[in-house]
Amino acid sequence: MTAISAVFWGLIVISLLVVVHEGGHFLVARAFGIRVTEFFIGMPCRLRLSRRSKKYGTEFGITPVLLGGYNRICGMEPLGDEHMPQVLAIVQRDGTTDAVAIAEELGISADEAYDNLLTLSDWASIARVEAPRGSDRADAFTTQRRDARLLTMYDKGHDFTTSGVTEAGEPRPIADADAFCEQERLHTYDGKAWWKRILILLAGAAVNIAIAFFLVIGDMTLVGIEVVSDTNVISGVERGGLAEQAGLQAGDRIVGIAGERTDSWTDISAAVDSALESAQPFEVSFERDGVSRTAEIALPSDGSATAIGIYASTEIYHATLAEATRVAVAYVGQVGTMVAQILMPQHTAEIVSQSSSVVGISVMASQAASSGASDFIALLAAVLLSLGLMNLLPIPPLDGGKILIEIIQAIRGKRVSMRAQTAISYAGLAFFMVIFVFALFNDVTRIIG
């Protein structure tokens, strides 16, 4: 049952993370008029449950591989070449075609034609129809359904209720191939200004951080936090501890320790520390059910005792908005500092040793859920904040790494080659795979321990 609980709550937390992070990318991309064809919880898989939005055209759904999630924002990988306008024009003219037919007509290789078709499919300018497995047929590519203004279901303002609509697979010839291709590119990530692309990349982490920030504030102000109540009534005793051996119980009111009067938990703490320093047995005066009693705390002769095993009473404190905001700001700063230290060689090993994988997060989520709403909200805020800030590290393939590439491209005035981007991304991926393995090892070791 413990394992089932960990899996259940782990999936809940991971799914929430996906929806929050990818939702940030989705909302900003859509605000800039970019096509988003898919939004899924879970990794890509042929088995899926989904529903297509009539408003956005986006297919929302879930797959059985619940280890993350993704958005398909059109035009994230700028491929294709100078033949792309002609390739698009042929598809529009014929309605349905394939790479071989296009290659013959344009006098290019089938691979060149296929790469252009894949790019246009990624733009959602055309649709790809995969050939059956084991078939000798090539993949077919068809036109999208378009309204009178040539807008697809993925575009803002599309209207399929008026005349002039062509269905998917129907020919829809265009007069100016270059102008039409450029118009299509404007509906993609690649077709937007560099600063808009950066905002899209920032959006996922920004939403993570913002929601974590408000969760901390909400937890402290609405749910409240458990704090020590400065009273001399104890809430419990440690099993097998010195206090239990002396006969103390939960609910006892401690009125004196070693001859010192104790009216609060502060007084109790100070008196216990003083008594322990003497390394001599001492007397505790207390009241139980209105009756005054005494008990003797017998200390070990070797002076090894550091506590007598009593617990303070607690109460729920609802912080003010100002107090909670200050705590939330400080918390963001602390987590940000910790995440940044992963790039500092002298701190990398320390940070990695404290990291948790999906296994550790699942176990902690289960424990937090069983402890109550406050603990679960606190854990969710911690994970959201950590992953949001981690995503801003300037290491591809993280969002921060992609932002760095966008800035470099804006300064240089030309693209960083796809080969260079791929090589850097593989290096970054290898770095984080090493961290994941160590974090997983740490989690397994802690759980077994």
Image (cartoon, rainbow, N blue to C red):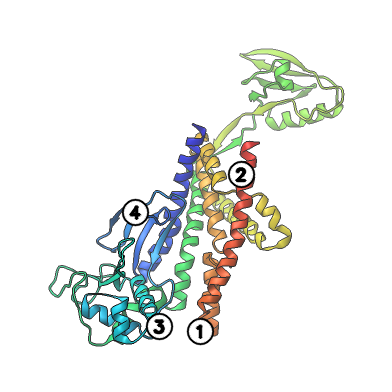
Circle 1 Cα neighbour tier, 10 Å, few/some/many (<14 / 14–19 / ≥20):
few
Circle 4 Cα neighbour tier, 10 Å, few/some/many (<14 / 14–19 / ≥20):
some
The secondary structure type at the circle numbered 1 is: loop
Left-right relation of 393 to 7: right
To which residue does mark 1 refer?
Answer: 414
Q: Earlier in the sequence, mark 4 or mark 1?
A: 4
Which quarter of the image is occupied by the C terminus?
A: top right
The secondary structure type at the circle numbered 4 is: strand
Mark 1–mark 2 Cα distance, whole angstroms, equals: 44 Å
Mark 3–mark 1 Cα distance, whole angstroms, equals: 16 Å
Kind of residue indicated by mark 4: Gly
Image depth: mark 3 or mark 1 in front? 3
Left-right relation of 277 to 209: right
Q: Earlier in the sequence, mark 1 or mark 2?
A: 1
To which residue does mark 3 refer?
Answer: 81
Mark 3–mark 4 Cα distance, whole angstroms, equals: 33 Å
Would you say the residues marked 3 and 2 are in contact, meaning their CB atoms lie under 8 Å apart?
Answer: no
Q: Earlier in the sequence, mark 3 or mark 2?
A: 3
Left-right relation of 98 to 205: left
Would you say the residues marked 3 and 4 are in contact, meaning their CB atoms lie under 8 Å apart?
Answer: no
The secondary structure type at the circle numbered 2 is: helix
